[in-house]
């Protein structure tokens, strides 16, 4: 007999690759402050909130700023980032995502979003996926960032399911830790060594087979 289960998807790195746009905007900001910011360093910002991302960036550049200046820079960064977001369309949905969501829909399994981004709703709208999600839980709904489980626990409530019946799909270590802390099943997307705390790891969304999903839901 099928278990009643629900899915919670992270956004950046799972549904779309917005990390490349975050990177361009953060790099510009770093350059304007007089230091460089590499793609390798950008890895540290994945899954991390906007405010925390700025703190990490300023640490890298060894720059200290007033609270007022930091707030101005956060606004500036987001405005530049949004210029990229406004140009997004369905071509930016990562390979394997549509097949995964269609599988869940066919099997009448509900799914919600659980992202740190405050722009999540807009991004899903731009790529044409917003209507398919039962609910959106994002950076506007939480007070504690991943690895705190808050975002996924709210997701479970939206699914009307107990946490142990929820499966989280995440690309960031902090996200996998948040899912584990919430007592949910975690699927990591990315490098198996980096995401070793996840219950299952796949290189990409495309690598998740229908057989794996069938086993998981049965
Ligand atoms: P925003 P996720 C995260 O999205 C990104 O991975 C992270 O790099 C970003 O700083 C964070 O959203 C906040 O995004 O500036 O749009 O509020 O992976 O949790 O979907
Ligand atoms: Mg992510």
Image (cartoon, rainbow, N blue to C red):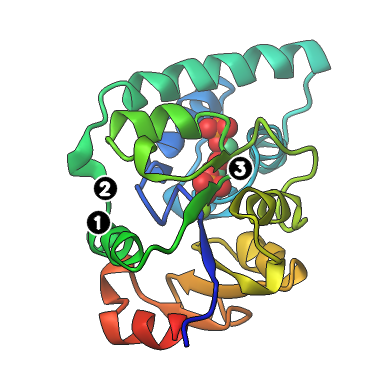
Image position, residue 177 (x, y; %): 69, 68
Image position, residue 1 (x, y; %): 47, 88
The residue that mark 3 highlights is 116
Is residue 155 toward the left or the right of residue 62 in the image? left
Image position, residue 211 (x, y; %): 29, 87
Image position, residue 192 (x, y; %): 48, 81
Does the Cβ of the disc 2 residue fall within 8 Å of ligand 1? no
Disc 1 secondary structure class: helix
Between discs 2 and 1, the one toward the N terminus: 2
CA neighbours of label 1 inside 10 A, class few (<14), some (14 to 19), many (20+): some
Q: Is 35 situated above or below 190?
A: above
Disc 3 secondary structure class: loop
In-front residue for pair 57/172: 172
Q: Are marks 1 and 3 in contact (CB under 8 Å)?
A: no
Between discs 2 and 3, the one toward the N terminus: 2
Task: Find the distance from the CA under tag 1 to the CA under tag 3.
Answer: 22 Å
Q: Residue furthest left?
A: 91
Q: Quadrant of the C terminus?
A: bottom left
Task: Find the distance from the CA under tag 2 to the CA under tag 1.
Answer: 8 Å
CA neighbours of label 2 inside 10 A, class few (<14), some (14 to 19), many (20+): some
Q: Are marks 2 and 1 in contact (CB under 8 Å)?
A: yes
Residue drawn at the location 26% of the way across and 60% of the way down = 102
Residue drawn at the location 64% of the way across and 36% of the way down = 139
The residue that mark 2 highlights is 93
Please identify, in this view, whether the residue under mark 2 or under mark 1 is nearer the observer: 1
Between discs 1 and 3, the one toward the N terminus: 1
Please identify, in this view, whether the residue under mark 1 or under mark 3 is nearer the observer: 1
In-front residue for pair 185/83: 185
Q: Is 179 situated above or below 38?
A: below
The residue that mark 1 highlights is 98
């Amino acid at each position: 007999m099928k278990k009643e289960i629900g899915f919670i998807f992270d956004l950046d790195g799972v549904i779309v690759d917005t990390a490349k746009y975050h990177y361009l905007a953060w790099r510009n900001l770093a350059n304007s402050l007089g230091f460089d910011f590499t793609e390798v360093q950008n890895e540290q910002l994945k899954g991390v909130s906007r405010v925390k991302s700025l703190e990490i960036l300023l640490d890298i550049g060894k720059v200290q700023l007033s609270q007022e200046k930091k707030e101005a820079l956060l606004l500036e960064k987001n405005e530049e980032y949004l210029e990229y977001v406004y140009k997004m369309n369905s071509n930016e949905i990562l390979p394997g995502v549509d097949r995964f969501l269609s599988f869940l829909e066919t099997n009448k399994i509900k799914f919600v979003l659980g992202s740190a981004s405050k722009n999540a709703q807009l991004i899903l709208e731009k790529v044409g996926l917003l209507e398919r999600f039962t609910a959106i839980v994002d950076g506007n709904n939480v007070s504690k960032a991943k690895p705190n489980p808050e975002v996924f626990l709210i997701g479970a409530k939206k699914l009307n399911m107990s946490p142990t019946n929820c499966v989280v799909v995440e690309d960031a270590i902090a996200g996998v830790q948040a899912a584990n802390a919430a007592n949910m099943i975690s699927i990591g997307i990315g490098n198996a060594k980096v995401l070793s705390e996840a219950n299952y790891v796949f290189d990409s969304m495309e690598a998740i087979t229908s057989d794996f999903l069938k086993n998981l839901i049965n």
